[in-house]
Amino acid sequence: MADQQDEILVAFGVDVNYAPHLAVTIASIVANAPGGRFRFLIIHDGFPQALRSEVEACAPKQVFQWEDVKSDEILSQEGYKHISRATYFRLAIPELAPASSSRAIYLDVDLVVLGDIRELAACDLNGNALGAVFDPAIDPRRFAGIHSLAPMPQGYFNAGVLLLDLERIRAGQLFSEVWKTVRERGKLLEWADQCALNFVFWGRWTPLDPMWNGQRPFIRDDDWITVYVDSKELQRHRRVRIVHYTTHEKPWLPQAYHPLSSFYFRYLKRTPFRRSAAAAARGSFVTQVRRYLKAQLYLARRSD
């Protein structure tokens, strides 16, 4: 278990267009971990210094490590459907993280953190190299069938929040296995490197408390999202510690709807992007009020 005063390594893979959302995620982390010491490892393929300074302003007492991707393997990847090349940047974490770092938290930037992320960093991985939360919108039986794997309930995880044991990953060259899977299985990987990660770690990852990756089906029931778990497994009655804005309903998109979008705007106010990003996304005053009231209603009905 990590001491809460230890420096926590939090890694991101992001392209420059997501700078405001990266800033929101970082602002939410530090706001909910008072006194925490963080190193933010930001893996990118081009980030101007002016934008770096704006992101760093969200956590002025923390360490920022900016790493420009130089791997030909990563740079040669193409986007697929709505998935950008930046999704592969997380596979460079073991290589680019400080050699002294034994653990890392990886986060997508379409999320906000509402709990103390030091608690996530201290989770017991039970000897595995990776911890994650299952993805309720992916059929694990179908995935297992496509890739000739043993069927496993809740066996497919969402890669937007990962707890990584870097020592085990480096020692076993496990992310090299992931890259081998990307090369060999190509279009069989419907969700790009997320599927490759699931293939390599199938049956050897540690399930985390689902509230550390509160995907949309954990928050509300939508007819247009097929889920492959029952209502008890979704645990909708519990308060999320990370709100992950999965699907195309991102809070920064005009007319998009998520019941907890107000949290995004709460932390956007703590960033230098508060005016430009908010103006593009907020919509009418009535829409803003409705978002806020729905979030408060959600919180009133949930308990920790």
Image (cartoon, rainbow, N blue to C red):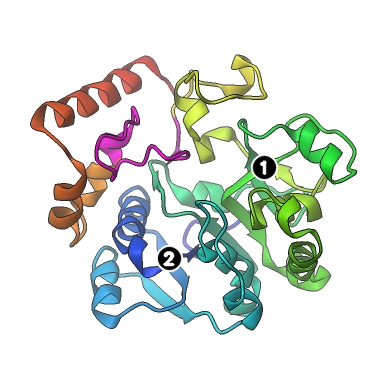
Mark 1 → mark 2, Cα distance in angstroms:
25 Å
Q: From the viewer's perspective, tell me whether residue 217 is left or right of residue 270.
A: right
Tag nearer the camera, 1 or 2: 1
Residue 177 shows up from this direction: yes
Q: Residue at x 45, y 32 (%)?
A: 240
Magenta stretch bounds:
240-263
Q: Residue at x 27, y 22 (%)?
A: 294
What type of secondary structure mainly makes up the magenta span?
A: loop
Q: Amino acid at mark 2?
A: Phe
Residue hosting label 1: 157
Taking the magenta stretch, the answer to whether it contains residue 255 is yes
Instruction: Give whichever of 148, 261 is nearer the camera.
Output: 148
Quarter of the rendering occupied by the C terminus: top left
Taking the magenta stretch, the answer to whether it contains residue 138 is no
Q: From the viewer's perspective, tell me whether residue 173 is left or right of residue 40.
A: right
Q: Which mark is residue 227?
A: none
| Neighbours of disc 2 within 10 Å: few (<14), some (14-19), many (20+) | many
Instruction: Give the x, y percent position of residue 276.
Output: 15, 56
Q: Residue at x 64, y 78 (%)?
A: 95
Residue hosting label 2: 38
| Neighbours of disc 1 within 10 Å: few (<14), some (14-19), many (20+) | many
249 vs 168: above or below: above
Q: Residue at x 48, y 80 (%)?
A: 67
Q: Amino acid at mark 1?
A: Phe
